[in-house]
Amino acid sequence: MSSTERPLPIAVIGAGFSGTMAAIQLLARLPRERSVLLCERADTFGRGLAYDTGNDAHLLNLRAANMSAFPDRPRHFEDWLGRLDPATEGAGIRATPPGTFAARGLFGRYLGELLRQAVTADGAPRLNLVNDAVIDLEPGPHGFVLRTEGGQSHRVAGAVLAMGNLATKAAPRSRYRADPWHMDDLGRLRVDLPVLIVGTGLTMVDAVTSLRARGFSGPITALSRRGLLPNPHASNIPWPLPALTARESASLSALLARIRSEIARAAAGGADWRGVIDGLRPVTDALWRGLPPTEQARFLRHLRPFWDVHRHRTAPPADATIRAEIARGTLSIRAGRILVIADGADHAAVTWRPRGTGEDRELAVQCILDATGIGRVEETDDPLLLRLIARGLVRPGPFGLGLDAGPDYRTQGSRRSPVLWTLGPLLRGTVWECIAVPDIRNEAADLAGVIAGTLDPAAAA
């Protein structure tokens, strides 16, 4: 490359929260002559699935105080909310005793404004939006050739994989399965047949709200292996981080016993289990990495669902909605697993087995919404990931939960690329806390420094 030629851009693939924040942080850390390509297959940038909703009842799962996009400006999102018109947008902002919770759509709008500011910043445009699906990153002498489904081709110095959560593999299959994030595709629903939601976590909460918002008044059944509901946020007293012993940090049984002991101590002192769980936040990743693989596997097999419903909580108004549905009998929560789905002319016959029994049951449903959460790398049909895996540039991470990556976010494979990184939920398994906004925003800032030091060490110094 000649001294007068502009340096190649860095590509960020995926424009949900992970990709949006990676792009914005890169613009702040890279020299002005290096641009950023932000690539997104969906119609909108900055929103992703979680924040592309106009339903004010779809509330964020974190308090507004924890949702700033910037680690060094913790009140940024709260201040943005404060500038909205309460008369026209107040329905999307819910003040509760544990804190203020905002609608997901408002957060998506907030991210969209940050992107617009980045695109229209003074000087030559440095953020270029590519509204197309990236299907290949072909290694070259100076980075990659990025190719899109629509036939575009871009030379880039490196790339960040920030595609968010991978889709889950639908099994057993049925033509009555539907996407809970695209309710408009469901068509007209009958009130005399139930809708089945597979999963009882946070996505289920939004799915119930969406069904009611579109006028469905019929019964809903939610089914998961353990039938656990996410716990709501509540006012709680902070609890100090316990001084864990080496044995407690390396043994799941010992660690669980210590956490239960701390919760009992907290309760005796008038505190709440939430303070204990929140107090572990600074060391959760270290605890995960410190557990032997056999203990990590035990956690995933036996304790992960219980951890998730305590760690990832729901907004109190959303929780109240679900509890009211259960009390009225319009929402049934079931623990068990699906055995067979047989499609009929106007419904699906779902055979399922309740947890702890050998007695199979059958449920006739008109629609099946998949709210099971995060898919595995081995099951992906994403053409980009499949090509990168075939080239040895990426590989599944621990337990197939995400991609293998080093502490510098660089992907690991049989061929290690010096200019391919990943961020956000694709780090799950390597980094445990990587799906919530506070974690991703910190990782995006850290990653931007790593990339700047790799591509432009003089400017980053």
Image (tube, rainbow, N blue to C red):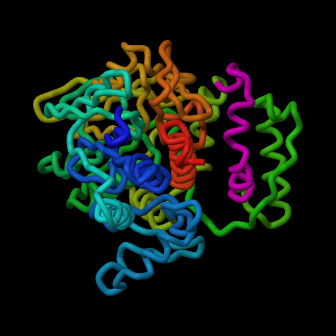
Q: Is residue 231 above or below residue 293?
A: below
Percent position (x, y) of residue 312? 55, 50
- 240 falls in the magenta region: no
Query: Residue 251's quadrant in the figure?
Result: top right
Percent position (x, y) of residue 438? 56, 55
* Residue 168 seen in the figure: yes
| Highlighted magenta segment, given as a residue range | 274-296
**Residue lying furthest bottom:** 87
Query: Residue 130's quadrant in the figure?
Result: top left
Residue at image point 85% right, 64% down: 269
Residue at image point 17% right, 51% down: 184
* Residue 204 seen in the figure: no
Which of 305 and 138 lies nearest the eye of the viewer?
A: 138
**Is 292 situated left or right of 446 in this image?**
right
Q: In this view, does 158 lie above or below 141?
A: below
Percent position (x, y) of residue 31? 45, 51
Query: Residue 379's quadrant in the figure?
Result: top left
Query: Which secondary structure class fits the magenta region best?
Result: helix
Q: Is residue 190 above or below residue 402?
A: below
